[in-house]
Image: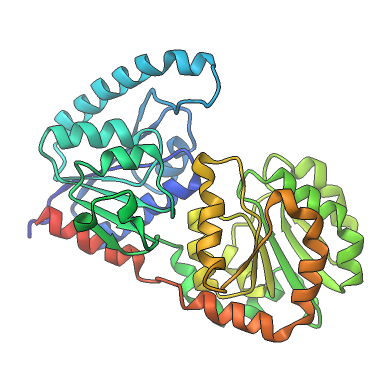
Amino acid sequence: MKQSINILISGGGTGGHIYPAIAIANELKLRYPNANFLFVGAKDKMEMEKVPQAGYDIKGLWISGVQRKLTSDNLSFPFKLMSSLWNASKIIKNFKPDVAIGTGGFASGPTLIMAGKKGIPTLIQEQNSYPGITNKLLSKKAQKICVAYDNLERFFPLNKIVKTGNPVRQDLLSIHTKREEGQTFFKLDKSKKTVFVLGGSLGARKINELIANNLDFFKKQDVQLIWQCGKLYFEEYKKYNSLENVQVHQFINKMDFGYAAADVIISRAGASSVSELCIVGKPVIFIPSPNVAEDHQTKNAKSIVDKHAALMIKESDLNSFSVVFESLMKDKGKQESLSENIKELALPSATKNIVDEIEKLIG
């Protein structure tokens, strides 16, 4: 196996596409210290900031998705697509990759299409239980498709699918030894149950409204809250930091401590979050976002709920939240069964398994 190789990775738009891409790159770098890496992202998206922060070079394409309603972005999409295909071709010609990896997002489409046309082996990593249009199209030419859920042969060629799981933060693999450290970090009362609320790095309006409207209810339940409200909502909700047993955070950098300290977690159901929560192994109430392509968060959550490993409340049913939450807090047996069942679904070796498949393509 040659050591000096060129690895092209494309993924972005959201943290759920970017962080798996970075995790894969980090594992490849451990195995091939002399490898050259180049990321391809969408201009003006968060990968243009996050990838360089992780120590990798990135080039941006002028590309965006197709909106569901008529907008100026839709009218410009054909021009963006042609521009991106042209520029992706130039990037590939100059970089000469040995393999191209796509983790989803707008830029991965043109990048992997042009890599495939030039005879470069390609691998896509599908995080969700219901794939988006881009990966469905790319799967026709890809050599391997790494997935995190069962039954994806409905969308992809069965002979290309490898169930690996989704890459997760490595510091989560040892969270079961960090409970006291997490409680100390967040200055928690160790005699009270802790509820950890997650709506994503930007935030989730419906979850934030739910928590704000139920602060008296949480007080009666005698629980303490670690509430990540997100960047977009912090100014609105930071006033609640003055309340006893409530702490509001814009963003939590020490997620392992938050998970370790939690007794119950309320979360969106993005693919990366679901994979992390399986490893964390705590009782979870999913509130999936309905505002995503193909309603994939609901499908992600349902795949866990169907195995009796989590609870789910749709945004349209949030008036039932207090009943669901209170019954869970009173039922220790239910908490334990949810915790045990979700741990059974964990795939902690996902990153290594994906990179094993990439090595086969390089070889």
Position in image of residue 47 (x %, y %): 44, 39
Q: Is residue 200 in view from this perspective?
A: yes
Give residue 12's position: percent from left, percent from top.
42, 40
Residue displayed at 62% across by 52% down: 288
| Figure check: 61 above or below 134 | above
Q: Quadrant of residue 170?
A: bottom left
| Image x and y of residue 204, in percent | 68, 46
Question: Residue 75, how many percent across, how many down?
Answer: 45, 13
Q: Is residue 253 above or below residue 46?
A: below
Q: How is the image coloured?
A: rainbow
Above or below, comparing residue 61 to residue 337 in the picture: above
Question: Is residue 33 among the parts visible in the rendering?
Answer: no
Q: Quadrant of the C terminus?
A: bottom left
The residue most toward the bottom is 333
Which of the 4 quarters of the picture holds residue 196? Answer: bottom right
Q: Residue at x 67, y 67 (%)?
A: 265
Foreground residue among 277 and 88: 277
The relative height of residue 285 versus residue 34 in the rendered view (above or below) is below
* Residue under the image location 89 percent in, 64 percent down: 217
- The residue drawn where x is 76% and y is 71% is 187
Quadrant of the rendered image containing residue 233: top right
In the displayed structure image, the side of residue 202 where residue 11 appears, left or right: left
- Quarter of the N terminus within the rendering: bottom left
Q: How many marks?
A: 0
Q: Is residue 227 found left or right of 310 in the rendered image?
A: right
Q: In the image, 205: left or right of 35?
A: right
Name the foreground residue: 130 vs 119.
Answer: 130
Q: Would you say 240 lies left or right of 172 here?
A: right
